[in-house]
Image (cartoon, rainbow, N blue to C red):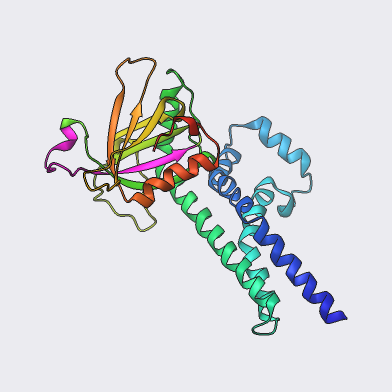
Amino acid sequence: MQGERIRRVLFSVAGTFIFFLDHFKLYSTFCASHCQAQEVLRQANNKALQQFLAARNPKNEHTLTLESLLIKPIQRVLRYPLFLKAMRDLTPHSSDERNHLIEAIKGMDKVADYINEMQRIHDLYSPLFNKLMSQSQSEEVRLNLTIGQLLHKCEVMWLNPPEELAKGWKKGHGPEVLCFVFISAIVITLEKKRTRKHSKGSILDVEEVKFSVAIPLALCSMFDLPDSDGVTDMWQLVHKSHMDPKPIRYLFRSLESEKNEVLQVIKEKGINSNVIQL
């Protein structure tokens, strides 16, 4: 009887983690913003903030500092896989509850990989995204390009770049660009080749970008461009700006699966799916 009760608990715990896997990805926004929050807290000239925090921790206990409280969600999400693995190691091999726990562990490992990748993107590209958001404030559509709004990232070949970026490329080829799909926009960026290497990684400065544009999803359409054999690895992104009557056309080539992934993440979120025509 006791053994059956424990089995039900293990199934319930593993099932809960599996059910909420996608929700754990919300930690990526918190983790990406954590370093910025630490910098704000260290600002010695913010006397009002320092006095407010000191009043709430009069004994100056380390565990009650805001820095300590802010790190706890990050520590917690990293401990969840260890918690699940500890339970797995205490279950009989080939048991159903062990297999269920293994499935939950694999899911949480993928969540950890996702959080690390979002952190990397934030560290490398936040200066660029901030610049594009600042530019959008004076234009027709305000954009939110924070890491919590990012849905997908991929690499595509740009087949019709401006003349100054097309030098050295044969017809049917072009530079590789990064495509970031946000809830409110698609960002296309072409980086310069990096020559500097740092032991702790490098930060992508805005000045290192050859080309970047943020296209509001509300003002763009996607079209298939199949060749004579019906191959659909080419697709077109059309930006119809209210400020310019002539639409801007971006021609790309990528794996069909990658193109479909871009479309899928937009449709799954129900974002302007009516303007996507593939």
| Residue that sits furthest to the bottom in the current view | 93
The C terminus is located in which quarter? top left
Residue under the image location 40 percent in, 34 percent down: 277
Vertical placement of residue 35 versus 51, above or below:
below
Tell me if residue 181 can be seen: yes
Residue under the image location 23 percent in, 43 percent down: 227
- First to last magenta residue range: 164-182
Relative to 164, is 275 on the left or the right? Answer: right
Q: In which quarter of the image is residue 40?
A: top right
Vertical placement of residue 71 versus 1, above or below:
above
The N terminus is located in which quarter? bottom right
Residue under the image location 24 percent in, 47 percent down: 193
Residue 119 percent location from the top left of the image: 49, 50
- Magenta segment includes 22: no
Residue 86 percent location from the top left of the image: 67, 75
Foreground residue among 90 and 204: 90
Tell me if residue 210 can be seen: no
Residue under the image location 44 percent in, 51 percent down: 120
Foreground residue among 233 and 64: 233
Q: Quadrant of residue 180?
A: top left
Relative to 202, is 118 on the left or the right? Answer: right
How many numbered discs, if any?
Answer: 0
Residue 136 percent location from the top left of the image: 43, 23
Q: Quadrant of residue 106?
A: bottom right
| Residue that sits furthest to the front in the current view | 229
Vertical placement of residue 141 versus 15, above or below:
above
